[in-house]
Amino acid sequence: MEQHIKNLDASYGAQNYHPLPVVLNKGQGVWLWDVNGKKYLDMMSAYSAVSHGHCHPELIAVMHAQSQKLSMCSRAFYSDTMPIFLEKLCTLLEYDRALLMNTGAEAVETAIKAARRWGYAHKGIADNKAEIIVFGNNFHGRTVGIVSFSSEQDYRHHFGPYLPGFHIAPFGDLEAVEKLINKNTCAVLVEPIQGEAGIVLPPSGWLKKLEQLCRAENVLLICDEIQSGIGRTGAWLACSHEDVKPDGVILGKALGGGLYPVSALVGRAALMDVFNPGSHGSTFGGNPLACAIAFKALEIMDRDNYLQNSAALGEYFLSGIKTIGSSAVREVRGKGLWIGVDLDPNMKNGRRTCEILMERGILSKETHETVVRFAPPLIITKAEIDYALVIIEDVLKA
Ligand SMILES: *Cc1c(COP(=O)(O)O)cnc(C)c1O
C-alpha cells in the first residue's frame, strides 16, 4: 500500500516537492496517522495552516451544514455569509475593510495591485513607475509576479522574464530601506517574522522604526502575516508585539481553519478603496462555504483562547528546547508556538533530523536545509509538549 502510493506519486505527479517518506491518511487534533496505523504528533501544522488541529468537529459541522445549504454562488450576487465574516474579521483585527481570495499568493498579488493603485491615485506616481521594497530571503508565494522579487534561486530559476518594480533590502536593515525609498516608492512589503527563511526575527524595534520611516515618507507598510498571523505567535497579528499597525495585512493559511483555502487583504480604507467594480476578482474568493468556515474558525480561536495558549505554551516550549544544549544546535528562536531550531550549518542535516524525528513519532519539515521548525496546532497541551520535548532532546543529542 505505502510503496504503491509512493510509486503512483512518482509516476503521475510533477516532482515539485520532496516529502518525508510517510503516507498519511488520518488526522485528529494534534495527531496524525499513517497508512500502517502509526501515530505522530504534528509539529508542522501544514505550514501553520492547521492551527485548530485536524478535523475540528465544530468546523466539520459548519462545513457540512453550509455545503448542504449554499457552497458557491460567485460574487455576481450577494451571499448572506460574506459580509458577516468581513465584519468579524475587520472587527477582530481593527481594520476598515477586507477583500477575500483563496490562496496566500493571490492575497499577496491583491496587495501589490492595491499598493500600486494607491501610489498612482494618492501619491501621484507617474503611470507604470511604482516601486515596492521587499526583503532578502522573503517568502510571499509562487506566482510569476511574486517569484520575480524572491532572492531564492530555487524559486526563480528559469521562470523569467520577471516582473519589474521591486527592490530588495536586507531583512532588518533600516538604512538600506531609507536609501531605496524615492518618489516612486508606493509600499514596503515585509513578513514581520520570516517563516520560510527559518523563523527569523528582525532586531527588536526594527519593525516600529520601519513603520515610522514609511509614515514619514508617505509609503505604505504592508505586512505578509499569512504564516505569522491568526494566533501563530500568540497574537492575532505578529506586528502587534511591536506595536505596529500596517496599512495593509495579508492573511491566509490558518484563516480557513485548516480545512479550506481562505485568504484576505485587510487594510485601511484609503488602501482598500482603490478597487472599483471590475478591477479585481476571483471566482471562488469569498464563497459562502469559505466564509462560513472562516467565521467559525475565528470564533473558536477567540472563544477557546488559542492566542493565550500559543503565547504561554510557546514560551514554555521555546525555553524547553533552549535548555537541551546540543553541539548540533546553533540557535533556537521563535515567537509563540512557532519555533526554529537552527542546526550546525556544516552538517546540513535538517532533512536527516526530520527523518529521525519521524521515526520517533514527530512530524516536521526542515527549511533551507539547516532549520527544523516546531509549529504544532495551537490547541496543543503542556503534556503533549512535554512528550515532544523528551523525543526532541533525544534526537538533537544523538
Ligand atoms: C505560505 C505563505 C505564502 C503563500 O501562501 P499560499 O497559500 O501557499 O499561496 C505567502 N507568504 C507567506 C509568508 C507564507 O508563509
Image: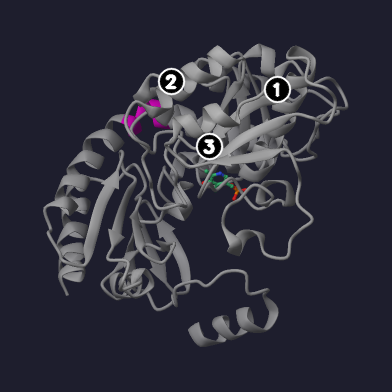
Residue 52, above or below 114: below
In which image quadrant can residue 273 be found? top right
Residue at 15 percent across and 50 percent down: it is 320
Residue at 53 percent across and 46 percent down: it is 138
| Farthest front residue in view | 179
User: Viewer-nearest of labels 2 and 3?
Assistant: 2
Residue 398 located within the stretch drawn in magenta: no
Q: CA distance from mark 2 to mark 1?
A: 33 Å
Magenta residue span:
301-307
Q: CA distance from mark 2 to mark 3?
A: 21 Å
Does residue 81 show up?
no
Q: Which mark is residue 244?
A: 2
Local SS, label 1: loop
Local SS, label 3: helix
Residue carrying label 1: 80
Q: Earlier in the sequence, mark 2 or mark 1?
A: 1
Residue carrying label 3: 255
Residue at 30 percent across and 37 percent down: it is 310
Disc 1 marks which amino acid? Answer: Asp
Residue at 68 percent across and 18 percent down: it is 271
Residue 71 position in % (x across, y down): 72, 39
Residue 355, above or below 307: below
